[in-house]
Image (cartoon, grey):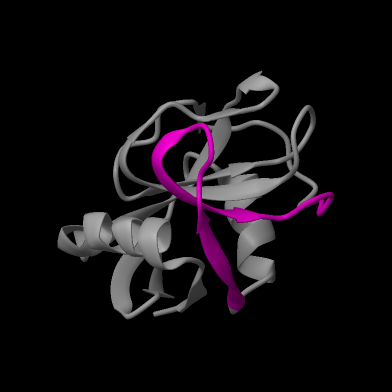
Amino acid sequence: MTKLKITAGPFEFEAKLETEAAPNTCKAFAAAMPYTSQLVHVRWSGEGVWIPLGDFDFGVGYENHTSHPAPGQFILYPGGISETEILLAYGGVDFSSKMGQLAGNHFITITKGHENLMELGNMVLWKGAQDIRFENA
């Protein structure tokens, strides 16, 4: 199990890469770390924040994919009918785009700091984009 430290806005989270369930996605993402970007609020999916990645190609297909990540789960949509993206559920999510329902690879799970997810989500919704950084713990 690979442990991660995630800093999102003013919050720190502990997390793990889901290396058994999504080995290819985890390997591709780990190669990009430390990874920094910004979180913006989702438009169609509910209580989630996302990192839009445009045409970026992690070189992975579907594995351990879901349309309904639980709070604290990160999914990677590898691209296709919509742009590549990483999504973090902070509440109820039905992963979708203007093209319709999507599925993404569940590859990171937050293990500590769940109590700050809703506040992070509301901060992104009401105050705008927040910085995020993923690094090995």
Residue furthest top in the image = 100
Which quadrant, please, contains the C terminus? Answer: bottom left
Residue furthest left in the image = 115
Q: Residue 7, located in which quarter of the rendered image?
A: bottom left
Q: Residue 89 or 34: which is nearer the viewer? A: 89
User: Where is 126 relative to 6, above or below?
Assistant: above
Q: Residue 81, located in which quarter of the rendered image?
A: top right
- Is 21 magenta? The answer is no
Horizontal and vertical percent position of residue 96: 56, 27
Q: Residue 9 or 62: which is nearer the viewer? A: 9
Task: Look at the image and tell me whether residue 16 can be seen.
Answer: no
Horizontal and vertical percent position of residue 40: 53, 58
Which quadrant, please, contains the N terminus? Answer: bottom left
Q: Residue 68, located in which quarter of the rendered image?
A: top left
Report the residue at 57% width, 27% height from top.
103
Task: Look at the image and tell me whether residue 56 can be seen.
Answer: yes
Q: Residue 33 or 71: which is nearer the viewer? A: 71
- Is 46 magenta? The answer is yes
Horizontal and vertical percent position of residue 35: 61, 74
Report the residue at 30% width, 69% height from top.
14
Q: Relative to 60, is 64 on the left or the right? A: left
The boundaries of the magenta stretch are 35-57
Considering the whole magenta stretch, tell me its main secondary structure: strand
Q: Residue 73 or 26: which is nearer the viewer? A: 73
Horizontal and vertical percent position of residue 43: 53, 39
Report the residue at 39% width, 76% height from top.
9
